Image: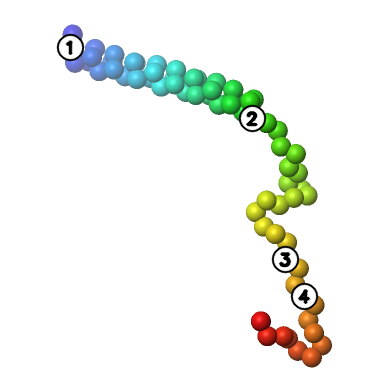
Amino acid sequence: MDLNNVLSTIIIVAFVVTVVLAVGSYMLYKLRERRRPRTAFDPSKENIFFERFFPRPASREGSEPL
C-alpha cells in the first residue's frame, strides 16, 4: 500500500467514526430529554435568579442613615 491509500483510509475511517458518534450522542440526548420530568415553572410569573426589591418610602425629614 502506498501512502495515499493509507491516508485516504484514515480519513474515511475518521469521518465514519465521527458521524456514528454524532448520531449516537444525539440519540442519547433525545432519550435523556424524554426521561426528564417536566417542571411547573412558569418564567412569566416566577424568577429563579433574582428577588424583587421594594425600596422603603422616603421619610419627609430626609433620608435615614443606613
- Helix, strand or loop at label 1? It is loop
Asked where in the image residue 1 lies, by quadrant, the reply is: top left
Compare marks 3 and 2 and give the one earlier in the sequence: 2
- The residue beneath circle 2 is 36
| Gap between marks 3 and 1 measured at Cα | 73 Å
Which amino acid is tagged 1? Asp
Compare marks 3 and 1 and give the one earlier in the sequence: 1
Q: Which dot, 4 or 1, sits closer to the camera?
A: 4
| Gap between marks 3 and 2 measured at Cα | 33 Å
Label tally:
4
Compare marks 2 and 1 and give the one earlier in the sequence: 1
Which amino acid is tagged 3? Phe
Residue 43, horizontal then vertical, whole percent:
73, 46
Residue 24, horizontal then vertical, whole percent:
49, 20
- The residue beneath circle 3 is 53
Compare marks 4 and 2 and give the one earlier in the sequence: 2
Q: What residue lies at 73% left-to-right and 42% top-to-bottom?
A: 41
Residue 64, horizontal then vertical, whole percent:
72, 85
| Gap between marks 4 and 2 measured at Cα | 42 Å
The circle drawn on residue 2 is 1
| Gap between marks 4 and 1 measured at Cα | 82 Å
- Helix, strand or loop at label 2? It is loop
For residue 39, side relative to residue 59 (left or right): left
Q: Residue furthest left?
A: 2
| Above or below, 59 relative to 31 | below
Q: Residue furthest top?
A: 1
Q: Residue furthest bottom?
A: 61
Which amino acid is tagged 4? Arg
